[in-house]
Image (cartoon, rainbow, N blue to C red):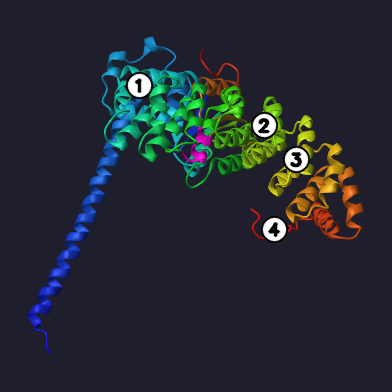
């Protein structure tokens, strides 16, 4: 079969033309983007003196306020970019400027917008720009039908910095429209130490998921005032196992010697190997030598992960723990191997292989 | 008049810092990356360098270390103030080990920055 030469040439010309059109289109897009970027850059440069004037310590010597309030909307973008990089009176000044320019009130109105992206953008903006105002409006979006908006609301509440948001955020961990605990946890951490009293109160909250999250965060903060309440959680045999484990880990991070007793009790009496392991790890972190004997007893546990954790904890107790380990290592049985492994780890960088299924 | 070199790849921050320091009666130069910042420092011999950490081409620590090992003893002694979001304990250790004189953590307050710049410059360099 032969293909007509004219057809081949026509097809070739069409392909070539298509390629040229595509190249021209790509070049045009690049050109337009480049021009837009340089125009935005130029506008920023033109508007920056207004931001400088607002932040100037000597307002009588600068640009009139009317010029700043009447400036184009690009000024808001500059201020919103700058806000997260500043703190103290600079941040408050810029927040006030956004409020005076109507940016905040428009965002408040947009919290009930029909489209999720507008609600999400509005709540994000309020988190940066509104400070501790409008917390109730932002918190309402924690129950939004869109997961993205709910996450944006949690992040915004964290940025806003009002400890009054703690209860709202913890409520969002449970229920039909629950938020990922990681998102809520980051928001609660963003609130900083001002949230600690509310977090401590929330340790007796209704939902296990929020109690576990709070226990973890108090451990991250290393809050010694939370130790008694966390110890109560570890002691409470009716408490959710996950919450008890998280509380035990938090006590290890806090490092209060008063926590030795409940942790030893959990190690000795619990039937949950994961709680026992966490309790042993926490005892190692606290470093109280009175835990030596219970940890030595833990070396005889049936569960290999508990034995390993007890051996590591003994190694962390210092000279007394090491001497105990050496004694056990010289003896017979599985405990000797765990004790020797802990000693080896103390003396060198060799990592003990984890048993299958252990995170 | 004391001369301050500001090196930051964020033009909004660099402009703001330059403006605030300029209002103190200081002469201010601005560069937008580490390599250009180091070249400017060698050419301009500033009295103080305000340096971002995370920058393209050459980061703030590399610039700081290069300044400290410069053949010119005066330049090697130039105070360097790191203006950076990396201000955790290990970052501070690394920064001071590289030769930083002081830190200002981002998010920052321009008033704190001014106080630290004033403290790093010879007395009388800054107009009240």
Question: Mark 1 or mark 4, which is nearer the start of the sequence?
Answer: 1
Range drawn in magenta: A179-187
Q: Foreground mark, 3 or 4? A: 3
- Which mark is first along the chain, 2 or 1? 1
Outermost residue, front side? A238
Q: Is residue A137 left or right of residue B92?
A: left
Give the letter of the chain under mark 4: A
Q: Secondary structure at mark 1?
A: helix
Mark 2–mark 3 contact, CB under 8 Å?
A: no
Upstream in the sequence, badge 3 or badge 1?
1
Q: Secondary structure at mark 2?
A: loop
> Residue A269, position in %: x, y?
77, 42
Q: In the rendered structure, which disc, 2 or 3, sits on the residue that comes first in sequence?
A: 2
Residue B125: give x, y in percent of width and height: 55, 19
Callout 3 secondary element: helix
Q: Which residue sits at x=23%, y=55%?
A: A26
Would residue A180 be counted in the magenta stretch?
yes
Among the two numbered marks 3 and 4 on one chain, the one whose residue lies closer to the N terminus = 3
The chain holding disc 2 is A
Question: For residue A195, which quarter of the picture?
Answer: top right
Mark found first going from the N terminus, 2 or 4: 2
Alpha carbons under labels 2 and 4: distance apart: 28 Å
For mark 1, name the chain.
Answer: A
Q: From the top left corner, tell me how far across and down residue B51 is, in percent.
A: 53, 35
Query: Label 4 belongs to which residue?
Result: A354
Residue sitting at 50 percent across and 33 percent down? A187
Residues at marks 3 and 1 touching, judged by CB atoms closer than 8 Å: no
Q: Which residue is mark 1?
A: A98
Q: Quadrant of the N terminus of chain A?
A: bottom left
Q: Point out which mark residue A266 bears.
A: 3
Dots 2 and 4: beta carbons under 8 Å? no
């Amino acid at each position: 079969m032969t293909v007509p030469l004219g057809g081949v040439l026509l097809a070739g010309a069409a392909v070539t033309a298509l390629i040229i059109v595509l190249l021209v289109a790509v070049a045009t897009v690049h050109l337009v983007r480049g021009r837009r970027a340089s125009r935005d850059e130029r506008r920023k440069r033109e508007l920056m003196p207004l931001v400088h004037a607002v932040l100037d310590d000597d307002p009588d010597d600068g640009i009139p306020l009317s010029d700043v309030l009447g400036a184009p909307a690009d000024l808001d973008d500059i201020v919103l970019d700058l806000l997260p990089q500043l703190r103290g009176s600079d941040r408050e000044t810029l927040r006030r400027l956004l409020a005076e320019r109507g940016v905040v009130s428009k965002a408040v109105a947009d919290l009930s917008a029909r489209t999720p992206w507008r609600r999400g953008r509005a709540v994000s903006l309020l988190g940066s720009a509104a400070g501790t105002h409008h917390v109730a409006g932002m918190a309402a979006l924690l129950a939004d039908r869109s997961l993205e908006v709910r996450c944006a609301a949690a992040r915004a509440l964290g940025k806003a910095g009002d400890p009054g948001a703690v209860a709202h955020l913890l409520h969002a961990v449970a229920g039909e429209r629950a938020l990922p605990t990681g998102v809520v946890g980051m928001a609660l951490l963003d609130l900083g130490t001002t949230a600690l009293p509310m977090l401590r109160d929330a340790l007796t909250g209704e939902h296990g998921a929020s109690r576990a999250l709070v226990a973890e965060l108090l451990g991250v903060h290393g809050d010694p005032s939370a130790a008694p309440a966390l110890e109560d959680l570890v002691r409470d045999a009716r408490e959710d196992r996950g919450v008890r484990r998280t509380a035990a880990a938090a006590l290890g991070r806090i490092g209060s010697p008063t926590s030795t007793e409940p942790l030893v009790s959990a190690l000795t009496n619990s039937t949950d190997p994961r709680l026992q392991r966490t309790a042993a790890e926490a005892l190692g972190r606290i470093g109280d030598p009175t835990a030596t004997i219970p940890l030595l007893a833990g070396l005889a546990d049936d569960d290999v992960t508990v034995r390993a954790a007890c051996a590591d904890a003994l190694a962390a107790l210092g000279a007394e723990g090491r001497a105990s380990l050496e004694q056990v290592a010289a003896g017979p049985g599985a405990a000797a191997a765990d004790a020797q492994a802990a000693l080896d780890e103390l003396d060198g960088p060799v990592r003990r292989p984890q048993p299958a299924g252990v995170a | 008049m004391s001369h301050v070199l500001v090196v930051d790849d964020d033009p909004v921050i660099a402009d703001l810092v330059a403006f605030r320091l300029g209002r103190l009666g200081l002469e201010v130069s601005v560069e937008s990356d580490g390599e250009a910042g180091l070249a400017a420092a060698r050419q301009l011999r500033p009295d103080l360098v305000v340096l971002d950490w995370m920058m393209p081409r050459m980061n703030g620590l590399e610039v700081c270390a290069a300044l400290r090992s410069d053949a010119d003893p005066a330049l090697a002694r130039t105070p360097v103030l790191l203006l950076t979001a990396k201000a955790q304990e290990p970052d501070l250790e690394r920064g001071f080990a590289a030769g930083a004189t002081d830190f200002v953590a981002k998010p920052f307050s321009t008033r704190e920055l001014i106080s630290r710049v004033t403290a790093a410059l010879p007395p009388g360099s800054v107009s009240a």
